[in-house]
């Protein structure tokens, strides 16, 4: 199949999932066209099967807001015609599903009929999408997609609760490339970052309020009162300065490293003993899954789709949002004893392996085939 993939090209989970999916589909022989405003961060090695088309929005003084959706839908129309793309898979409803719907209508006027598959990722539904300013357009674009998928059962329930959806929403969980990831590191070089006697704790996010980075710092603060440890903070965003200030106030700046947006997430996870994800909500928690594949157990909140990824008492522990005392006590249960830590590390890996890309990608292929078939049968 020739598939157009629309996504955010940034470090966020939806862009990562879209990119890894496209690469994996290309290995299965499909021709993939990424269409977005920048080359996705995880996309390298463009080749005959993997193409990138940049959406450019020329600046014009009249426009207070640059019309990205317009540029994207025009680009989609052009790319579908130029490369005979058979299906568009858009990740994140806003504004991608809306732009794809417009492209579909423009193409239909030229008798080119192409299905749209929309994947909902979380914040497009739970945080941004249901805002009254966007809701009618988001609901319309979901209902007018030819197939809709979402990344967890929890997100499916949230979508039905927040919107009037008349479409079947298929849950296709996020995934991870077990073989590729496991072959990346043989030596974790732990000594470059901490002493042998120190536990290493990690957090990866976009530092938005939903991630509750203050809780990350508070959990770490309590942990380091009982054992010697370092905290690796990877990512960047609005709450970074607040997190750095909090470290200063608590007198732990020497024990916390802020890496910013880094391409070395897997290197840091490789030598980490524990991952913290105390978010207000997560539709899935891809960062936790990536940690688990690096044999890093997870302490997280019990919200959204996280319990579908992290098994309480097996690959980590879950607690109510904001309960930093329970979270730090649970962390200490794992970190205080070498043999318990070893067991949780092994469990984390085992739990992550269930989400191997090879098990999940066939569900997308099937969804594409059905969508293409439906369009050709209905003749539209
Ligand atoms: O977490 C974010 O703020 C980024 C956001 C995104 O769109 O990349 O992440 C969402 O999608 C990821 C991939 O499906 C999920 O793993 C994250 O849980 C989800 N974030 C939230 O629901 C807050």
Image (cartoon, grey):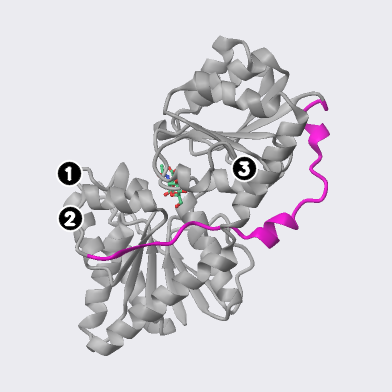
Is residue 67 visible to us here? yes
**Residue corresponding to mark 1:** 132
* Eye-nearest disc, 2 or 3: 2
> Which stretch appears magenta?
167-196
Q: Residue at (27%, 68%) from the top-left corner?
A: 145
Q: Main secondary structure of the magenta part?
A: loop
Answer yes or no: do the residues labelled 2 and 3 have beta carbons within 8 Å? no
Whether the residue under disc 2 has CB within 8 Å of ligand 1: no
Q: Which tag, 3 or 1, sits closer to the chain's start?
A: 1
**Residue corresponding to mark 2:** 164
**Residue corresponding to mark 3:** 262
Q: Nearer the viewer, residue 98 or 63?
A: 98
- Residue 355 in the image: above or below residue 102: above
Q: Secondary structure at mark 2?
A: loop
Where residue 272 appears, x then y in whole percent? 70, 36
Q: Alpha carbon of mark 3 to alpha carbon of mark 1: how far?
A: 35 Å
Residue 184 in which image quadrant: bottom right
Q: Residue at (57%, 81%) from the top-left corner?
A: 29
Whether the residue under disc 1 has CB within 8 Å of ligand 1: no
Is residue 263 visible to us here? no
Q: Alpha carbon of mark 2 to alpha carbon of mark 3: how far?
A: 39 Å
* Eye-nearest disc, 3 or 1: 1
Q: Residue at (52%, 16%) from the top-left corner?
A: 246
Quadrant where the C terminus lies?
bottom left
Dot 1 alpha-carbon crowd within 10 angstroms: few under 14, some 14 to 19, many 20 or more: few
Position of 261 with respect to 165 (left or right) is right
């Amino acid at each position: 199949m020739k598939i157009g993939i629309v996504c955010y090209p940034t470090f966020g989970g939806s862009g990562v999932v879209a990119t890894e999916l496209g690469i994996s589909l290309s290995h299965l022989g499909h021709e993939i066209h990424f269409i977005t405003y920048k080359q996705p961060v995880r996309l390298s090695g463009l080749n005959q099967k993997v193409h990138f088309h940049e959406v450019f929005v020329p600046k014009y003084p009249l426009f207070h807001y640059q019309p990205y959706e317009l540029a994207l839908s025009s680009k989609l129309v052009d790319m579908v015609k130029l490369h005979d793309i058979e299906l568009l898979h858009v990740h994140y409803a806003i504004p991608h599903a809306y732009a794809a719907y417009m492209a579909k209508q423009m193409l239909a006027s030229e008798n080119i009929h192409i299905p749209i598959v929309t994947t909902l990722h979380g914040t497009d539904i739970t945080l941004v999408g249901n805002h009254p300013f966007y809701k009618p357009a988001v609901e319309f674009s979901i209902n007018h997609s030819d197939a809709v998928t979402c990344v967890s059962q929890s997100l499916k329930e949230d979508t039905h609760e927040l919107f009037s959806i008349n479409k079947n929403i298929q849950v296709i969980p996020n995934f991870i490339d077990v073989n590729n990831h496991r072959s990346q590191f043989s030596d974790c070089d732990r000594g470059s970052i901490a002493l042998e006697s120190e536990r290493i704790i990690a957090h990866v996010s976009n530092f938005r309020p939903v991630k509750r980075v203050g809780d990350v710092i508070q959990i770490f603060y309590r942990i380091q009162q009982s054992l010697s440890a370092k905290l690796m903070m990877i990512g960047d965003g609005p709450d970074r300065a607040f997190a750095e200030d909090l470290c200063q106030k608590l007198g732990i700046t020497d024990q916390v490293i802020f890496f910013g947006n880094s391409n070395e997430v897997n290197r840091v996870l490789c030598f980490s003993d524990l991952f913290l994800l105390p978010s207000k909500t997560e539709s899935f928690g891809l960062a936790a899954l990536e940690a688990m594949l690096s044999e890093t157990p997870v302490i997280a909140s019990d919200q959204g789709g996280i319990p579908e990824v992290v098994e309480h008492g097996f690959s980590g522990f879950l607690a109510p949002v904001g309960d930093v005392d329970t979270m730090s006590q649970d962390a200490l249960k794992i970190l205080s004893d070498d043999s318990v830590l070893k067991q949780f590390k092994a469990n984390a890996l085992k739990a992550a392996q269930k989400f191997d890309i090879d098990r999940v990608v066939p569900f997308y292929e099937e969804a594409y085939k059905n969508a293409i078939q439906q369009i050709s049968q209905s003749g539209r």
